[in-house]
Image: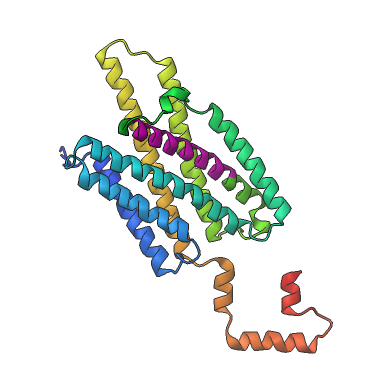
Amino acid sequence: MHFNFAFSATQILWTLTFAAQLVLLVVLLGRDRISRYPLFSASIVLFSLRLLTEVLLAGRLPQMTLRTVFISFAVLTALLALAVVVEIARRAFAGAARGAWLGWSLASLVVAAGVLAFWGPWPARGELAVDSPLALLRLMQFVAQKVDTLTDVLAIELGLLVLCIGRKYKAGWRSHTQAIAIGLSTVAVAWLSVQGIWQVIAHTVHPLTRADYERVINLGSKLVSANKVVYIAVLVWWIVWLWFDEPKAAEAVSESPAEEAAIEGQAAVLTEWPSRDEAEQA
């Protein structure tokens, strides 16, 4: 028995991605997470709008207008993604000293700038001249690509820092901040891996026939599809972890007034014990 599906793999992945983003937005809104992560929520909204726009406008606008819209979305998405990394970093290390903040931020930027300098091709200075609308679009696309790469490297560094020392601050085990940071770093690792593999293929594989060229293009399409699968898995990860309350929040809600009164009574009798505020500060 043979099954004929009317949808291609690209269409299925697009549908799953868009549906998962909508579910994530429902979770962010219904579980009151937007107030804590406004930029992260805005990035999901913008990416969803970008996906929807690509489908609605493809083939319905002149090529130049369509390219302008898509590249403008790419620039906005890249800048907002960078702001999201900063937002999650501030949430994760809210209790860090200012000197530690500056030190880790400077070290992260130096490493990211070093990776950015050697990652991907850099055009000549004359190629970045803005002397026509098409040249402006090329410059915008170049900026979006480099900001994306910078954001990916910073996201990976943030994920490693959260896993290593996040428990000392505001990104402990099963916290929403940790879940978002892990997801961002996973997406970044997947996309940089796809780019790295494609660069290796571009420099080592030289197709001589039409069939060889088509095989290389199909391999590139499979790499992009694999990256989309990783992003869908991360969306599901965010949906699950952001739906549940953080452990400390759940414990605070589970305590009844009678239990709190009993704890306060014990603290009043046993005066040699520290108070609850002192214990939490300790």
Task: Give the side of residue 195 with respect to residue 161, left or right.
Answer: left
Identify the coloring. rainbow
Quadrant into which the N terminus falls: top left
Quadrant into which the C terminus falls: bottom right
Residue 137: % across, % down: 34, 35
Q: Give the range drawn in magenta.
A: 135-157
Task: Give the side of residue 171 with respect to residue 41, left or right.
Answer: right
Chief secondary structure of the magenta span? helix
Residue 275: % across, % down: 76, 80
Return the residue nearer the eye: 19 or 140. 140
Task: Give the side of residue 254 with respect to residue 243, left or right.
Answer: right
Task: Give the side of residue 30 with respect to residue 56, left or right.
Answer: right
Which residue: 59% across, 56% down?
A: 90
Residue 138 painted magenta: yes
Instruction: Give the residue at the far front of this rendering.
Output: 131
Which residue: 36% across, 50% down?
A: 47
Picture quadrant of residue 270: bottom right
Q: Is 234 rendered above or below residue 193?
A: below
Q: Can residue 123 be seen in this view?
A: no
Instruction: Give the residue at the far top of this rendering.
Output: 208
Q: Can residue 64 be seen in this view?
A: yes
Picture quadrant of residue 278: bottom right
Picture quadrant of residue 202: top left
Q: Is 54 rendered above or below residue 223?
A: below
Q: Is 79 rendered above or below residue 269?
A: above
Which residue: 33% across, 58% down?
A: 22
